[in-house]
Amino acid sequence: MIEFNKYNFAPVMDYPEDYSQFHVFGFTKGYHPESIPNQKWGIGRYNEKRFNMYETELFEGERNVHMGIDIWAPTGKPVYSFYNGQVLYMRENDNPGDYGPTIVIHYQLSGQSLYALYGHLSRESLAMVSERDPVQKGQQIATLGDNDVNGGWEPHLHFQLSVDDPGEADMPGVVAEENREEALEKFPDPRLVLGELY
């Protein structure tokens, strides 16, 4: 078992130290892009069952329980590695509703592997690091992409943890209700790394 409380992690973005400045979204009643504040920080919650949000073919009409945390911020904001690790996978996931440019980094904590997906990045991010590159705690690895490249979403970072090697620059960011309990074991709460953002 990883003892997360033994570590001092770097923030993955330059968000406010005062977490009360975050707008915490509730997508349980649906997603409305016009409700996303343009120049403010926002949070999309982990393990939230969302409605009317994942409607492209990618989600098979049934996957709607969110397995990461979304950090909503303006396009171009820098994204950082939370700890020392190694870039494992990179890819542009360019399906409608997908992650767009995506980086997965492998970390070793308490002698165990942990994988983190950074999604909805800019295309330029895929030239900032390369697969197998070592990365340092607090090192900039990416910037946020706009909705032309990030799957069509308002700009935000999807940050997700996995205890299993995903094998590619992808993880199911949402799962079906019947797979929820298994997914919660495989994809731990990102607040273990990010802190209590909400």
Image (cartoon, grey):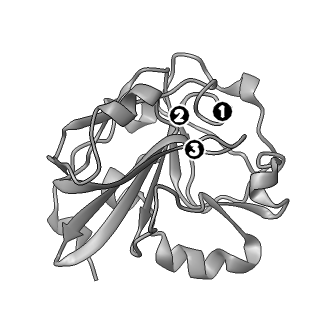
Mark number, residue 141? none
Q: Please give the name of the residue rendered at 17% of the width and 76% of the height, measured from the top-left corner.
A: 110
Mark 2 to mark 3 CA distance (whole Å): 10 Å
The residue singled out by tag 2 in the image is 156
Relative to 170, residue 99 above or below: above
SS of the residue under disc 1: loop
Amino acid at pointer 3: Tyr
Relative to 162, residue 97 above or below: above
Q: Please give the name of the residue rendered at 74% of the width and 22% of the height, measured from the top-left corner.
A: 34
Q: Please give the name of the residue rendered at 44% of the width and 35% of the height, measured from the top-left corner.
A: 20
SS of the residue under disc 3: loop
Amino acid at pointer 1: Trp
Please tell me which of labels 1 and 3 falls first in the chain: 3
- Determine whether label 1 and label 3 are within 8 Å by CB: no
| Structural crowding at the residue carrying mark 2, measured as other residues with C-alpha within 10 Å and reported as few (<14), some (14–19) or many (≥20) | many
Relative to 132, residue 22 above or below: above
| Residue 18 visible somewhere in the drawing | no
Mark 1 to mark 3 CA distance (whole Å): 9 Å
Amino acid at pointer 2: His
| Structural crowding at the residue carrying mark 1, measured as other residues with C-alpha within 10 Å and reported as few (<14), some (14–19) or many (≥20) | some
Tell me where residue 164 appears, x and y as whole percent: 41, 75
Q: Between 14 and 62, which is closer to the camera in this rendering?
A: 62
Mark 1 vs mark 3: in front: 3
Tell me where residue 22 appears, x and y as whole percent: 48, 33
- Determine whether label 2 and label 1 are within 8 Å by CB: yes
The residue singled out by tag 1 in the image is 153
Residue 161, quarter of picture: bottom left
Tell me where residue 176 appears, x and y as whole percent: 74, 70
- Determine whether label 2 and label 3 are within 8 Å by CB: no
Residue 99 lies left or right of residue 164; in this view the side is: right
SS of the residue under disc 2: strand
